[in-house]
Image (cartoon, rainbow, N blue to C red):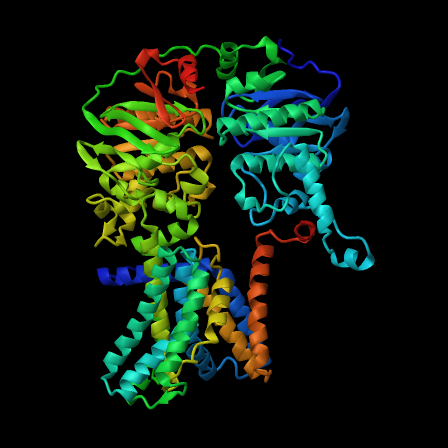
Amino acid sequence: MRFETTQGQVRSREVIGRFVGALLRFSSVYVGLVVICILLSFVSPFFLTVTNLMNIVLQAAPVSIIAAGLTVVLINGEIDLSLGSLIGMTGSVAAILIIKEGYPIIIGIIAGLLSGIIAGLLNGVVTVIFRIPSFIVTLAMLGIAQGTGFLLTNGRPVHGFPPLYSVIGQGSIGPVPVPAIIALGIYISIHFILTRTRFGIEVYAAGGGRRAAEMAGIRVNRVIIAAFALSGACGGIAGIVLSSRLDAGDGNFGASNLLDAVAATVVGGTSLMGGAGSVMGTLGGVLIISVIRNGLVLLDVQAFWQQVAVGVIIVLAVVINEIARGELNLASIRRSLNR
Amino acid sequence: MHATGQQRPHAILSARGIVKRFPGVVALNRVEFDLLCGEVHALLGENGAGKSTLVNILTGVFAPDEGELSVGGAPVEFDSPRDARAAGIHAIHQELSFVPQLDIATNLALGNLPVRSGVFSQMFGIIDHKELHSRARRALARTGSRLESSTAATKLSVAQAQMLEIARALDGDFRVILFDEPTSSLGPAERNELFAQIRRLRADGIGIVYISHRLEEVFELADYVTVLRDGSVAASGPASMFDNNRVVELITGKAVTQTKPPRRPIGEVSLEVSNLSSPPQVVEVTFALRRGEIVGLTGLVGAGRTELAECLYGARSVSHGTIRLDGKIISPSSPAEAMKLGLGYATEDRKSSGIFHRLSIELNMAISAFGRPNIASRFLRFGSLLRSSELRRIAQEHVRNLGIRPPQVRTAAGTLSGGNQQKVMLARLLAAQLRVLVLDEPTRGVDVGAKDQIWALLQRLAEEGLPLLVISSDVPELLGRVDRALVMRRGRIVAEIVGDAITEAGIMHHAL
């Protein structure tokens, strides 16, 4: 029996097939995710309900968006520590323009995104022109962005977005929250950019070997600036989403999300040395961390333990990975301690 | 003179029947080596003859596959460089191994810092600065150095840093010191200082292994000479039994059978370089490269060949001079720009600046073409989106033409053998459809079969009219394959040899 298929159907199947293929390549992350979910479903009957699962993805959305940007920068061989604070700053920009100044929603959103992109561009430009490690540059930007957020909002949350703006963070299509849909869109886009465009390939190449990339004729510095701009844009989107969900702009928002984003990329198998990684792995990492946080809440564990748990997960993920690759065993531990 | 296999009595360090294999090559084949106390023993050979491998085995970096080492007559087995040092063997490498931020005294004592006596000091490891500096001063005095022990190591010249390394070796009470190309970055005055030092060490009864390409130095210093060729000892004997020509012959092997230089139609000038300088590595270099011509650029390591290529490729700043490409003056300020103009370069250092180990073969091949006007559109839609099927098709074509194994274009390039990685780098330049190619050591670390394939490909490209500049330290491979050979020494082109006149002895004569 044969089915007639249109070209469009074939193409969309191809795209979905590739997406699933990419997910499978990071199967260890997703196997871990499934195992944790199964364990939690035994521990708490509430865990596997639609309400709870949707709550998890809603909570995870802002972290997942900045983690996607962070993944690009890490593959490029750099780091972006300013991403968490960009959430607060960009949300504050939108809040001030829309609530205090009365501009249309779209202007507020565009300005918020632009402020994120500009911060990212600055990160990139300063890193490549002054040859300062991006660790330092983006640490400085962390302070600058957070301070700017506080300055804009005068240190107090600015409340009262119009209802239409609230749809971004609070709306849902069927049971699926809009922030989760936005996040998924970003993951598909960035996955496409990294694997199917010149820029993406050059990000991997420059991160894998800066000198080799230069000698192959790649304008490495421009690639780095663009990667930071993309990362800043992710910070901006996350800022809009979170400000809408919490119905406020505040310089403090997002500050704690950086740890989770770094954890997610590490768990997802992105190399902090650059040159390797994938947003699909990061997505799995974000979900693992969010599910564990949710599980701890369901188990009535004190909130501060969640922070400890995320720290432990970072190290554990790397250790498990090394054991799996056969690079960590008793002999190697002895050698390490003898050096 | 051929003492091969014959053991010299009273050796402080000796190696018997050393065999070391690497994937695809036998680096050392039954090598015998004896070093006496108070002797400077020169170890000679071409790049790739096995000198470094032998040094690495003598200093515990590698373990030999067969054969044995003995120190002072007692058999030893080194598991690590630490073991070799414990046995009194120390190597002074070209790259110096001290911490620039620390002062000389601390550098000298690293790994063996003196701790003050007393329970508290012992427990917390409180450093005995007085002892640290007096030890350093003693070591510096032994090398005849006037340096202060509290000088920061950053302030040292290369020669002084080398003195520091020697002082450290003396501090450690070593019996054998190996010098690996110690003069490659020294001026004449510094070199004389180093030689005086080496003579002092010899007088103290220390055994010295001296590796250098510069034959005049060898005859100035060495008591005994061992020549390696293709991983075996070609000759070994007292230095008085050799002369310059004999050594060159031994290093390069027998007179190579002369093959007729290929006759290709040679076209008009494509690349014209005049007075190009980037001192001190490149000085007033002038030459021209014609269509369909293969020109070999040779000379010793450190003669400035790679630096010259980097000047052409925009990877090194040029102080003056001009580059003309097809009549038009160009001055590329980056490799990206040079590539855009049509000038391609494959680096000698495939591992760290050539191949992208984690990217697939097909992406490794296509990546330079992305920056080429007109050609990029074969690989990219709208200048940005990959045309995957086209990319794969072109990559498969190159894999077939170049005989790359394994032929799966989606394999990570890092998993390929050296020869196949080299072919991938060539394919990258071919895919970018450039107007001039500069290839730096395209056959280094490549097995014999792949070497011939690479040369066959270069001949084919030249027949199609592409001008090629091939940098090589492996002089024999240039014979009969290049139309002209340029010889560089200390930044200058000192000779140009055409066609049949190209001989190994001739080239070595100019290079040394």
Farthest residue, direction right: B119
State left or right for residue B482 relative to residue A8. right
Is residue B192 among the parts visible in the rendering? yes
Q: Position of residue B147 (x, y in %)?
A: 60, 39
Farthest residue, direction bottom: A160
Q: Position of residue B26 (x, y in %)?
A: 56, 26
Q: Nearer the viewer, residue A36 or B362?
A: B362
Which image quadrant is residue A38 in?
A: bottom right
Which image quadrant is residue A69 in?
A: bottom left
**A190 is higher (above) or lower (below) than A48:** above
Residue drawn where x is 71% and y is 43% of the image? B134
Q: Nearer the viewer, residue B332 or B447?
A: B332
State left or right for residue B103 relative to residue B444. right
Quadrant of the image for the N terminus of chain B? top right
Image label count: 0
Q: Nearer the viewer, residue A261 or B198?
A: B198
Residue drawn where x is 43% and y is 32% of the image? B419
Residue drawn where x is 43% and y is 68% of the image? A140
**B316 is higher (above) or lower (below) than B27:** below
Q: Position of residue A93 (x, y in %)?
A: 32, 79
Which image quadrant is residue A183 in?
A: bottom left
Q: Position of residue B425 (x, y in %)?
A: 36, 37
Is residue A186 among the parts visible in the rendering? no
**A298 is higher (above) or lower (below) than B450:** below
